[in-house]
Amino acid sequence: MRQFPPDFLWGVATSAYQIEGATRVDGRGESIWDRFAATPGKIQDKSDGSVACEHYRRWPEDIELMRWMGLKSYRFSIAWPRILPEGRGRVNAAGVDFYSRLVDSLLGAGIEPFVTLYHWDLPQVLEDQGGWPSRATGDAFVEYADVISRALGDRVNRWITHNEPWCISYLGYGNGEHAPGHKDWSKMLAAAHTLLVSHGNAVKVLRANVKNAEVGITLNLTPGEPASPSPEDADATRDFDGGFNRWFLEPLYGRGYPQDVIEDHVKAGRIASPHLDFIQPGDLETIAAPTDFLGVNFYSRAVLRSNRIPEEQNAPRTVFVRPDKTDMDWEVCPASLTRLLVHLESEYKPGPIYITENGCAYSTAPSADGRVHDVQRVEYLRGHLAACGDAIAQGVKLAGYFAWSLLDNFEWAYGYTKRFGLVWVDYATQQRIPKDSAHLYRDVVAQNGLDVEQAA
Ligand code: FCB
């Protein structure tokens, strides 16, 4: 048996737009994902989040599932457009009440709420006024953080400001695969900056409103690893790691934006000058506001090779080394999670780290016996929990693990075609069936450890 530290926080994670449904109920305003999903060609199966898992009314059943799993904590996000339908100003009491009831019931079930403020559902009105590239959106975010932390801060002490600023800025404003769907490098960098500055400002507000607050941010970190020992592949790896990971880690830990990445942007003609004119005096200090933990979402690694060789210019830069891939085409490589955690600990000393998401998409459906034998997810989970154990053994202050996700749900641009849940959702009937992975996780939580014999 591989034991975890006594107070290790075991949980699952979800986000509002992906599970709640009820997008036009109780005064909720429109979000950028409602608008984006309604735009032809954006979502693979032409679906949207209007029904999703109907969590907005089935939440008592979902809490029951978590209680059955013995979870210590539940990471969920608040839908900003439910709280402030116009983005700022008027507070929608019905929206606040929903989360207040959820929090009370979680606490009643002995499950600690772990709240994410922004998991991608920006009020559409704020996008219409400029969205994340505009500093005004950052100010609105801080007001929203103030409103909701005043309402819930007497019962919730763990807060995540933003979920995955790389995805918000790059997918939302860079390549346009996510809402609001822009394709503009300078907008992307400005969006990332507003997100980081608003994170720093929200940290202060949360600390002021919440006693014993523990505040942090969640980054999606994908370690880059070179395909060969060649200097070209090393440089491709530096480049990938710079844009994906260091662009966020470095300013958060007080080192400013990485110069090598800025130079690459200029060389590639993505920005005109190395002077980032969206940075105002004091911003870098704000971004580096001390936090209580770092949230890490880990799914996979990227193996990089250079495509600077002329005849390889159009070859993909990311290559797959190991044969096992999930339905997302993400390589399964638990050892790289250990390497990432050890690197974060030694390089940035972020204090406690939570894995705020880790999981995999496999579509395994119920069998004739009525159960869901998601063998690959069980393997993935075991491998990654063992990798967490290895990191702890090497001195990483890992304080908790949140499996993504409690339920199969709306996987953004993929719609309902990718299933990440520990619990199967039959979208026609809304029936929930805990998969074999949920049973495994339940055992792990009960034992506060992983049966390595079983894992082998
Ligand atoms: C992460 C998101 C989460 C989910 C997983 C699969 O990037 O935070 O909402 O979609 O990927």
Image (cartoon, grey):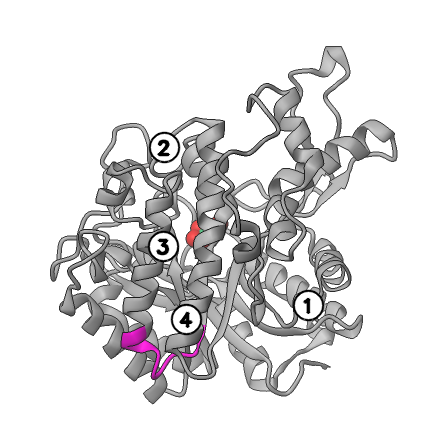
Kind of residue indicated by mark 3: Asn
Find disc 4 in the rendering and name its residue.
206
Instruction: Point out residue 241 in the picture as x, y percentages from the top left corner.
Output: 68, 41
Question: Mark 3 — residue?
Answer: 409
> x, y percentage for residue 207?
44, 74
Mark toward the viewer: 3 or 2: 2
Left or right: residue 114 versus residue 64 is right
Q: Position of residue 198 (x, y in %)?
A: 43, 54
Q: Residue at x 49, y 48 (%)?
A: 165
Question: Closer to the camera: disc 4 or disc 3?
Answer: 4
The residue drawn where x is 40% and y is 68% is: 205
Q: Which residue is mark 1?
A: 388
Mark nearest the camera among 2 and 4 is 4
Please give the residue where the numbered disc 2 appears in the rendered image. 181
Q: Nearer the viewer, mark 1 or mark 3?
A: 1
- Amino acid residing under circle 4: Leu
Label 2, label 1: how far apart the Cα atoms are: 35 Å
Residues at marks 3 and 2 touching, judged by CB atoms closer than 8 Å:
no
Say what secondary structure mark 4 lies in: helix
Q: Earlier in the sequence, mark 4 or mark 3?
A: 4
- Residue 78 shows in this picture: no
Q: Secondary structure at mark 2?
A: loop
- Does label 3 point to a residue whose CB lies under 8 Å from ligand 1? no
370 magenta-colored: no
Expressed as whole percent of the image width and height from the top left, the position of residue 235 reads 78, 32
Q: For the N terminus, which image quadrant?
A: bottom right
Looking at the image, is mark 1 or mark 3 earlier in the sequence?
Answer: 1
At 72% from the left and 74% from the top, the residue drawn is: 452
Q: Identify the mark nearer the N-term, 2 or 1.
A: 2
Q: Which element is circle 3 on?
A: loop
* Mark 4 surroundings within 10 Å by alpha-carbon count, few (fewer than 14), some (14 through 19), many (20 or more): many
